Amino acid sequence: MDTVSRRKFLATSTFLLSARSYARILGANDRIQIGQIGCGHRASGHRKMLKLSAETDPNFDLRSVCDLWSVNRERAADEAQRLFGKRPKTFQYSEEMLADPELDAVMIGTGDHQHAKILAEVVRAGKDCYCEKPMANTLADAKLARDAVLTSKQVVQMGSQWLSCPYQHRVRDIIRSGKLGKIVAIDQSWNFNGPRWHIPKDENVAAIREKDTDWKRWLLGRPDRPFDPYVYFEFRIFKDFSGGITDQWYSHASGLAHFYLDTFIPDDTVSNGGIFAWHDVRENPDTFQCVSTFAKSEALYTYSTTFGNAYGDHTIIRGTRGTLYSPGGVQAGTGAAAGPDGRAAHQTGRRPQSPHGQLARVHARQENAQRKH
């Protein structure tokens, strides 16, 4: 009889056990030990998703959380205590957390400009990693992370949205089936009405003090500047720390285009944009458009975003025999106006929409087989 590990036996026998009982029986050595680096809003979402996962497959512990800001660390530990009934270890610096030999995997949810260097640090420490997008926003950082991952044995996943969603795979199945004919163009537009990523009365901006964090470490090699709470929390609108729309939204959208077309890198790209709607403290454009050509696929890809109008979100895939149209792309804008402090826009400027039914309408026209083109 083959030897069956305790963990495998328990995992295949869960129909006899409640999730809570199963979690108690699995020892610490049998469960995946997870740590978080970066404990802001995104990391809170990760913890809630881990909680949902634990209800059906409680094979992990949230072992530790790490954040430069003391308030974020304590918030994260408190929330983990409420969600999982156990308080994780807290660390200010990633190298301290990664020195733990019992830690198996790490989730990175820091600022954009920190992703690549921390990802490289994580895999060099022998830990598997889930890293929020973008992997990097400079070519040098991208190469650093790439080389570290390729020379390691670690499992790494980047957090590009929707690529694991069944309905997106269904879209690609339709494309591959030939029902749309040859794909010649993909057009995406994702929009918002409000000063995205800038909240003048953000409570975190008012709460943070330089002595409660490590500003020099947070900069992580970017040009030195005086401590600035707005930069700290609203890094997405500052050029030294993020590409803004390109890092945050275009990266997801173009990832879908690559997925649909079974390709990775465009042959040429032209983009333009500017600050046309919100003349606040932002440095990155609030309006952006990009056009890419894929020579191998013989297809054109266009993408646009504005934060001055939420109307008209869509993904349109055009083929020689039909068109797949998804209203809202993946999310639909409501067209709501921004409130005086921007919060209303964050709450109502875009309304999340269920992906089910989002496959939308396929307008196929059957060409006459004898028609001359």
Image (tube, rainbow, N blue to C red):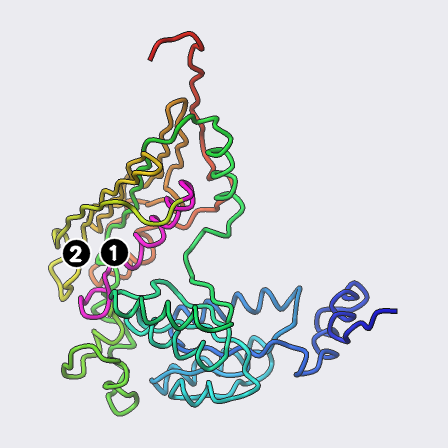
Q: Are marks 2 and 1 in contact (CB under 8 Å)?
A: yes
In which quarter of the view is residue 245 placed? bottom left
Residue at which label 2 appears: 285
Q: Position of residue 109 (x, y in %)?
A: 39, 71
Q: Is residue 103 left or right of residue 5?
A: left
Residue at which label 1 appears: 245
Q: Amino acid at mark 1?
A: Ile
Helix, strand or loop at mark 1: helix
**Vertical order, 116 against 305 (above or below):** below
Residue at (39, 70) in percent of width and height: 41
Residue range in magenta is: 236-262
Q: 7 and 278: which one is in front? A: 7
Helix, strand or loop at mark 2: loop
Q: Position of residue 45 (x, y in %)?
A: 46, 67
Residue at (45, 79) in percent of width and height: 76
In which quarter of the view is residue 285 placed? bottom left
Find the residue positioned furthest to the front. 151
